Image (cartoon, coloured by chain):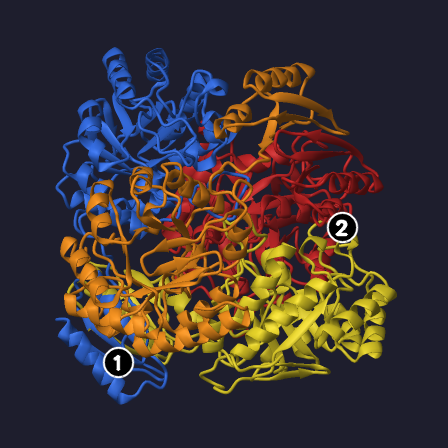
Chain colours: A orange, B blue, C yellow, D red
Amino acid sequence: MIVVMEKGATKEQVEHMVQRVESLGLKAQTIVGAERTVIAAIGEKRPETRQSLESGPGVAEVVPILAPYKRASREVKPEPTQVVAGSLRMGAGAIGIIAGPCSVESLDQIVTTARAVKAAGATALRGGAFKPRTSPYSFQGLKETGLKHLAAAREATGLAVVTEVISPEDVELVAHYADVLQIGARNMQNYRLLEAVGHTKRAVLLKRGPAATMEELLLAAEYILNEGNTQVMLCERGIRTFEAHTRFTLPLASVPYLHHKTHLPIVVDPSHGTGHTYLVPEMAAAAIAAGADGLILEVHPDPEKAMSDGYQSLNIPQFQATMDVCRRVAAALGKTI
Amino acid sequence: MIVVMEKGATKEQVEHMVQRVESLGLKAQTIVGAERTVIAAIGEKRPETRQSLESGPGVAEVVPILAPYKRASREVKPEPTQVVAGSLRMGAGAIGIIAGPCSVESLDQIVTTARAVKAAGATALRGGAFKPRTSPYSFQGLKETGLKHLAAAREATGLAVVTEVISPEDVELVAHYADVLQIGARNMQNYRLLEAVGHTKRAVLLKRGPAATMEELLLAAEYILNEGNTQVMLCERGIRTFEAHTRFTLPLASVPYLHHKTHLPIVVDPSHGTGHTYLVPEMAAAAIAAGADGLILEVHPDPEKAMSDGYQSLNIPQFQATMDVCRRVAAALGKTI
Amino acid sequence: MIVVMEKGATKEQVEHMVQRVESLGLKAQTIVGAERTVIAAIGEKRPETRQSLESGPGVAEVVPILAPYKRASREVKPEPTQVVAGSLRMGAGAIGIIAGPCSVESLDQIVTTARAVKAAGATALRGGAFKPRTSPYSFQGLKETGLKHLAAAREATGLAVVTEVISPEDVELVAHYADVLQIGARNMQNYRLLEAVGHTKRAVLLKRGPAATMEELLLAAEYILNEGNTQVMLCERGIRTFEAHTRFTLPLASVPYLHHKTHLPIVVDPSHGTGHTYLVPEMAAAAIAAGADGLILEVHPDPEKAMSDGYQSLNIPQFQATMDVCRRVAAALGKTI
Amino acid sequence: MIVVMEKGATKEQVEHMVQRVESLGLKAQTIVGAERTVIAAIGEKRPETRQSLESGPGVAEVVPILAPYKRASREVKPEPTQVVAGSLRMGAGAIGIIAGPCSVESLDQIVTTARAVKAAGATALRGGAFKPRTSPYSFQGLKETGLKHLAAAREATGLAVVTEVISPEDVELVAHYADVLQIGARNMQNYRLLEAVGHTKRAVLLKRGPAATMEELLLAAEYILNEGNTQVMLCERGIRTFEAHTRFTLPLASVPYLHHKTHLPIVVDPSHGTGHTYLVPEMAAAAIAAGADGLILEVHPDPEKAMSDGYQSLNIPQFQATMDVCRRVAAALGKTI
């Protein structure tokens, strides 16, 4: 950590800060520059340390040097993690494809879709039973009935089930039926929920919040890893920016950046990441080209009749065509889907 | 709702969409323009309707006309709501000042601070007992012990207690001690939590998420109002933008905008909204000038030693000076603090 | 255009607005909804019309239906445009690769680089002679000497020259040496400059401003097209967002979106779009997978010694490797580079 | 400047970077931490230095310590600058009010408006003669005729004239008629234009670009100051964010932040900063409360008939009411307008 003193900071202020640094159990090394003095604080341990120093007298800013996450870091674990959950394998060379409707609407709908997406190459089934909705007046999901339908679809196809959990009190129930627990973007910093899924044996798909930094995403993963659950996948699903022609802005540079920083698999969601069906196929292919370890795609047999998210869902032929392109792009990179 | 057809949409596509609109229980009125056809869908009811129409054939976009929130809307309740919770009165002419430390650290710290902020003019006490922290390695709060300290501080000063609740399972406990339940920015769309506080008799301070639109904020309030709790205050605490010289960007135009749209009181948090102590006094005064119904301010007797957020906390003399300016600005607008 | 009246707008206000609409030469059709009245204004012509209506009494908002750009629109010209400038062909199936240093530093540097990038597959040479720099104390470019070096490099390799022009008064000079005039992101809305390049016979590479919407980008292109120059390429080079781990956020969904809206070729700049060398190869491949008609890449024989932008430049072996991957991804899509 | 090496950087890489730092004329001081090595580079001079070091082997990042602007900095000139231009005085305790229409439309319109805004307390007149417009099909201004009308309005009222210049070639002409040359947000980084106005004797109002950082704004001012013109005012007019309920997001914390960093006067534009007439009065008052040295406001006798920006213009009674509130808020802070 580097404590930058203000220009004109007094000798007393510098000495005060040196003592503060040392009282925090760190070693202080003072560097007197042409215009300013900076203090290097060596051996840093905790996020609080930085904040504590920032309010010191004569301090202009405090610059952190080390990443605050550990277990998620490639510095701690250089080799990539592969998550395995039923039929789904993701990371360390394996590309997983999670496909299915936004919401489970009926037994017939989910089983039919599961069969169709499996035939086209999906390796896991998605479908929401507990739905977090922006408006209290929107469809909130079939809840446990939906989970049962998902389990039936797994029975019928062998596809692993990926479904969202939105509250700590539901974790046990959802984990009973699901292979992968999805943490939605709105809940990325719902720490009780992160701890709760960290206590299970289920793999977790953690979606980036639309205003979360990479560091916040990795620290959210750290909450799960810290409870002993190592089967965590990170999902880029788009951020909030001034752009209004897409529902979110999908920043694919997250993929190589995260591969550089963490050993966890990186999944991309081009459905939420664009919000428009006609943009999904190109962005799915682009995600694979950027090195994604997997995709999560909204697919519905009849998007116009979907109870949610129809505007960004692929129908079955569109999904097949998307998979064909993605397979060819993966092959161009020496990978297989 | 206006369904805009693509240029070149066929007669069949237009007819198909007219039938879709009517099948949703709406009246369709077709307008043939110079270059495009649009269909006005009259009598809209639900957010799903829009999404359902967007995936229709030949549809370019669907433009909503009505706001999706109702109970929070000034169109439904034109007169302003005043929230009353113990010593705190906020809205409809009353300006409330909530002040105190980020975290409750000890009985002595919170009682001392409570006395000092009351003397300077605060009308409620803030202090975190359950702390949502970005890193699992950061101080997580004193939990129930902290709540007890807060209650003791209320006992000593008469100040209403405002404190955060971060999980539905804690709501009953926190409501036992607190006068106002705060929903933090990270939890603005934690719908189970919103419903849980909606079931209590406590006033709620709902903070805007850093990437939330005004509509999403009002819909989050709608979740609480919809459960029967009408004592909701909205809090602008800054958004995520490309600006890095402040921790968040504090958009004060939210205040007059929200006053235009909703009857609920609007509170501003200049501490989180700027992230730097030296910017807080000016932004507090600016918030009052913009018409805010209240402020929530981080105040700590010794910010350099605070266990969290010291870099954005005012010390007692700074808080007094800030209050003096705010009082004069309020008086200039014909209001009193 | 749809004029949405406020709830509770009076009959007089509606009538006033109908007359306003008609006085602008449009046909008005009034639609009385369950809660609001809207007026469809049919036959719209100019951007001003919207603004003029927005300040009317009782008007809640005005929703435009038609895109304000015309010549750039696919509705006007459905078939894709191919830009041809010397050795560069871009669009309508052709993928162009523009590579070279940020700045022309010397004759030797630019000729050496030109030979190397040509050998690796580049189809045009980039290099800045007039440099717009954030700080007045930064290197501002070799100016006409740089242009002469670029012309010498073209002589030596046959590669078309792409270089930036930053002021209307330089257009004639730069057009004398260059094959493609580049308009930088900072100048996307420098309308005099757009008009000036619109008057030349040179192809134009128009970079998106970091806060520009798609509509503003297309309207900037419209300024050039409107002067009679049809050889315009649009370049996505990243936008300003809250993300700090990349210099800009590169939103590749711009590529399929723009292909949907315009016939002009779409180029991607992964160098500025990420700001870090190690992220460029993946994002170059992703851009091709997203359907880009071309790439513009910063390449320098010795990035550590570059006078500008070394941190985001590829060296020659990195460029070769990037080209190899891009060629394979293009082949996977049935295209050739 | 602090060069942060990657964890695991080799001794050779550290030595290489020490040599690079020294070859740039800086002194290197190596600090070996618990997990990483950092190199303090003492005596930094130029922005290029940072970029040059960032592409070194084993370098994780380079952290700048000094601000890159000098003449605009309060570290160089601690006392505030007061700009004086005709009737306008701005900064160092003086609050200036610039008011008038977006565009000069006719002699009568501008003279009438000038008289009205003067009567209500404006200290300068704004009005556009050269208009930069997003669309080539929009009204582009009356050009020299407009300038003559502005001069006539000054003659009639004594108000200083503030008007935009959009191209270096027009600077002489505009400076002939105007008291203050306005650089619009789109041209904040049009460096030739900045240099051109830097050569004149006219005061300059420099508007922040909607995606510009504070540092970029101050460096743009540096271009003007560097040419010898010290009469520069900075104007916050809103930034591009995800917020869509206002045209731009107006971050008033810029005011105290800039006062902390620079001696130049800070002006706020609540008209462009909100984009809606009904939000302007509150944001004008808030800007004064935040410590702004002045305001620039769009005022039109009949906004509904304005040729541009009517939706964000105040009419005369609204301007009078806004001035009344601003005067009272200024008085509350011990200032006068």
Q: Is C7 positioned to the left or the right of C218 in the image?
A: left
Residue A218, how many percent across, how many down?
45, 44
For this rendering, which residue is in front, B111 or B251?
A: B111
Q: Which mark is residue C99?
A: none
Identified at 38% across, 61% down, the residue is: A247
Mark 1, Cα crowd under 10 Å, few <14 / some 14-19 / many 20+, is some
Foreground tag (2 vs 1): 2
Give the percent coordinates (x, y) of residue D18.
78, 38
Secondary element under disc 1, as helix, strand or loop, is strand
Q: Is residue D279 visible?
A: yes
Q: Which residue is mark 2?
A: C138
- Give the residue type at disc 2: Ser
Residue ID for mark 1: B31
Disc 2/disc 1 C-alpha distance (Å): 57 Å
10 Å crowding of disc 2: few (<14), some (14-19), many (20+): some
Write down the quadrant of residue A109 in the picture: bottom left
Give the residue displayed 40% in from the left and 70% down from the top. Answer: A280
Horizontal arrangement in the rendering, residue B19 relative to residue B11 (left or right): left
Label 1 marks a residue whose chain is B
Position of residue C227 in the picture relative to residue C176 (left or right): left
Q: Nearer the viewer, residue D139 or D184?
A: D184
Q: Nearer the viewer, residue C53 or D63?
A: D63
Secondary structure type for disc 2: loop
Chain to which the residue tagged by mark 2 belongs: C
Visible residue check, residue C218: no
Residue D24 location (% of width, % of height):
82, 42
Position of B35 with respect to C292 (left or right) is left
Please identify the quadrant where the C terminus of chain A is shown.
bottom left
The image quadrant that residue C336 belongs to is bottom right
**Mark 2 and mark 1 residues within 8 Å of each other at the beta carbon:** no
